[in-house]
Image (tube, grey):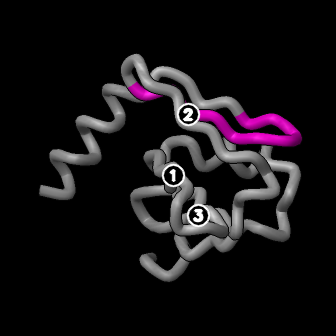
Amino acid sequence: MGIIYNVLIRRRIRKLVIEDDYVELTVGNEKSRLEMSEIQYVLINKYSISFIPNKVNLTLLSIGISYREEVLNNFSHKELIVDNSNLYQ
């Protein structure tokens, strides 16, 4: 089930935008956006990267691990990144 979900998400992601003040993800025809002030941390796991919001009523953004380098290179708030990917080697 997880593999199927991962493949479907990868096919649907059209655009990931990382700016100094927000992260925006376009999936299909829908856009989801988190302001930097709304991000508690960015969790990098073996297969996914999640932008975890600091409030329950905000949308969690999750993308495939193939975006790892883009996130590491373009996300300016490095102190918010929790990289757990080495735990799975």
* Residue 22 picture location, percent across and down: 76, 41
Left or right for 69, reference 57: right
The residue that label 3 is drawn on is: 52
Of the numbered discs in the image, which one, if any, rests on residue 25? 2
Q: Earlier in the sequence, mark 3 or mark 1?
A: 3
Give the crowd class for mark 1: few <14, some 14-19, many >=20 residues within 10 Å: some
Q: Earlier in the sequence, mark 3 or mark 2?
A: 2
Q: Earlier in the sequence, mark 2 or mark 1?
A: 2
The residue furthest left is 1
Question: Mark 3 touching mark 2, by CB under 8 A?
Answer: no
Residue 19 highlighted magenta (yes or no): yes
The residue that label 1 is drawn on is: 59
Instruction: Using the image as rendered, state which of residue 66 and residue 29 is in the foreground.
Output: 29
Of the numbered discs in the image, which one, if any, rests on residue 41? none
Q: Quadrant of the C terminus?
A: bottom left
Give the crowd class for mark 2: few <14, some 14-19, many >=20 residues within 10 Å: some
Q: Amino acid at mark 2?
A: Leu
Q: Amino acid at mark 1?
A: Thr
Magenta segment, principal secondary structure? strand
Tell me the element at label 2: strand
Marks 3 and 2, Cα distance to the nearest angstrom? 13 Å
- How many circles with numbers are drawn on the protein? 3
* Residue 11 picture location, percent across and down: 31, 27
Tell me the element at label 3: strand
Question: Mark 3 touching mark 1, by CB under 8 A?
Answer: no
Name the image quarter holding residue 42.
bottom right
Left or right for 75, reference 64: right
Q: Does 6 sit above or below residue 16?
A: below
Name the image quarter holding residue 1.
bottom left
Instruction: Using the image as rendered, state which of residue 41 and residue 66 is in the foreground.
Output: 41
Marks 3 and 1, Cα distance to the nearest angstrom? 8 Å
